[in-house]
Amino acid sequence: MKRGLDCLFIHTGRFSRGRWDMTLMPAGLFALADVLQGRNIRSQMLNFSLAKMKNPRFPLNDFIRTSGASIICMPLHWHQQSGDVISLARSIKSRFPSKKIILGGITASCFAGEILRDFHEVDFIIRGEAEKPLPMLVERLLSGANTCDDIPNLVRRRGTKIVANSGKYVASKDAFENLCFTNLDLVFDSDGYISESRRLENVDFSYVPGRGCLHDCSLCGGGARSHKIISDRKQLVCKSPRAVAQDFERLRSRGISSVAIAFDPFENSRYYTAVFRELKRKKILLRVRFESFGLPAKKFLEKFKETFAPGSGICISPDTGSDDVRKRNKGRFYDNESLLGTLELMSRMNIAVRVCFTSGLPFETREDFFKTAALIEYLQGKLKIKNIGVAPVPLEPCSPAFLNPRKFHVKLRRKRFADFMRQKGGYDLGYSTDEFSEREIVKNIKYLQRLVHGGNAKKLH
C-alpha cells in the first residue's frame, strides 16, 4: 500500500473583493517542505488560493482526506492573509478535529500568544525560524510523543496557559547554505504555480538567497529589529555564489527561464557581483528582475548587464520625491541627485528599470507629496521612463512605526491581531500620520496613480 503524506502545507492566499490574490508562496515554505522530505517525512505544498482560482469548487476536504496527512502547516507570513488563514484553519479543524494545525511566518510570530489564546483551531505556532523546530515537532506528533519542552521557538498551550519554550534556533551560515528554496517537485500543480507567477510577476519564480537585514525602514516588518525581536537573528546569512548557481541550475532544469530576486540589504555590491560571476562561469543564462533596496553601483550594473538574458531589469523604490522624507524612512538613503544619476547611467547602458513610489510615509507633508508628483513627472518627461509604479504600503506588524508610533508620528488603527484580521483590500492601510488622515493618504496614492497612467490628476486638496 502506497504511503500517504505526513504533512501538508497549505498556502491560503487572500480572498478580497470577490477574487483571490496573494497567490505566490513565501520562499521559506519551499525550504521547510524540503527539510521534512529529507528526513523521510512525506510533505507537499498546496496553493489553496491558486486551486480555488482554477476551480471555485476545489474539494479541499477530499484533498486533505485523500492525502492522509495528519499535520497541516499553514504559513501566516503576510498580514493581509490573517483572516483567511484563521478562517481556513477553523474550517479544517471542524472537519478533521484530530489533525494538528501549525502556523508560522512573520505575522504568526508577532502575535503568537494572542492567536493561541483566541483561536483554538490553531495547535502550535513556531515563532521565528523553523527549519529545526518544525521537523522536531512533526516527528514528535507522528510518534505520539507527549513532550515538546525542548523544541526551540515553539509556542503552545499547556492546559489553560500559553507557553513559549525557552530554546532559540537561528539558522547558521552552514545550515542556511544547505537549505533548498527551489524544490518545485513538492508543489501540487507546480506548472500552474509557475504560470501564475508569470502572470502576476512577469517571471517564473521568486528566489531569495539570504535571510536577515542590516537596516530598518519605517513601515517594513522585515528589518533588522524585527528579525531580532522575532527570531533573535542578529546577522545576515547568505548562500554562497556556488550554492546560488546550483539553485539556478535546478530551476533551469525545471524549465524556469526567468527569476525575481528581492533581497538586497548590502552596503556594497561585492556579494552579488560574485554571484553574477559564478552564474556567468556556469553559463546559466536566465532573465532576472532584481529589486534594489538602495541604488545599484556602476560595477553591479556592468556585471548585471553581462550576466543575464535580454529583458532583465532592476526595480528601484525611492518611494518619495523628498530627500528629507526618504532619509527619515529608508534604511539605505540616497538623494534625488544620486537617483537621477543612476537612472541616467542605466539608460545609457540600456538596462530596463522600474521606479516605484508611494505616499503616506511618516513625516511626509503636503509639500513633500507634491515633490513626489514633480519627480514622477520629471522621470516621465525628461528621462522618458515609462515603467513607474505607485502602490499603497500598509503598516506591517513589527515594523519600526508599528513598534514605536510616537517616534514616527503615526496613529495606529491596527494594534492587535484581531485588527489585522479585519483588514480589507489593498488600500486598507491601518494608520494615519500627523499630516494626513488614512483617507487622505489613499487619495494621494490614487492621484499619483492617475498621474502615472496619464489620467486627470490636475487637482488635489
Image: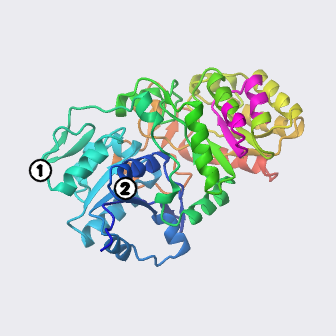
**Which residue is more in the foreground, 21 or 440?**
21
- Visible in this render: residue 320? no
Q: Which of marks 1 and 2 is nearer the N terminus?
A: 2
Foreground tag (1 vs 2)? 1
Say if residue 73 shows up in the picture: yes
- Residue 42 part of the magenta-drawn span: no
Per the rendering, the mark at residue 17 is: none
Residue 240: give x, y in percent of width and height.
Answer: 55, 30
Q: How is the image coloured?
A: rainbow
Q: In which quarter of the image is the C terminus?
A: top right
Tell me if mark 1 has few (under 14), some (14-19) or many (20+) residues whose alpha carbon lies within 10 angstroms of its own. Answer: few
Q: Which of 372 and 275 is in front in this view?
A: 275
The residue depicted at 25 percent of the width and 43 percent of the height is: 113
* Residue at numbered disc 1: 146
Q: What secondary structure is found at the residue carrying circle 1?
A: loop
Query: Vertical placement of 426 versus 129: above or below?
Result: below
Find residue 377 and report its horizontal and vertical position in percent. 82, 39
Residue type at mark 1: give it: Asn
Residue 74, numbered circle: 2
* Residue density around tag 2, few if under 14, some if 14–19, many if 20 or more, within 10 Å: many
The answer for how far apart the CA atoms under marks 1 and 2 are is: 22 Å
Q: Give left or right: position of 257 versus 106.
A: right
Examine the image and state in which quarter residue 254 appears.
bottom right
The stretch in magenta equals: 278-305
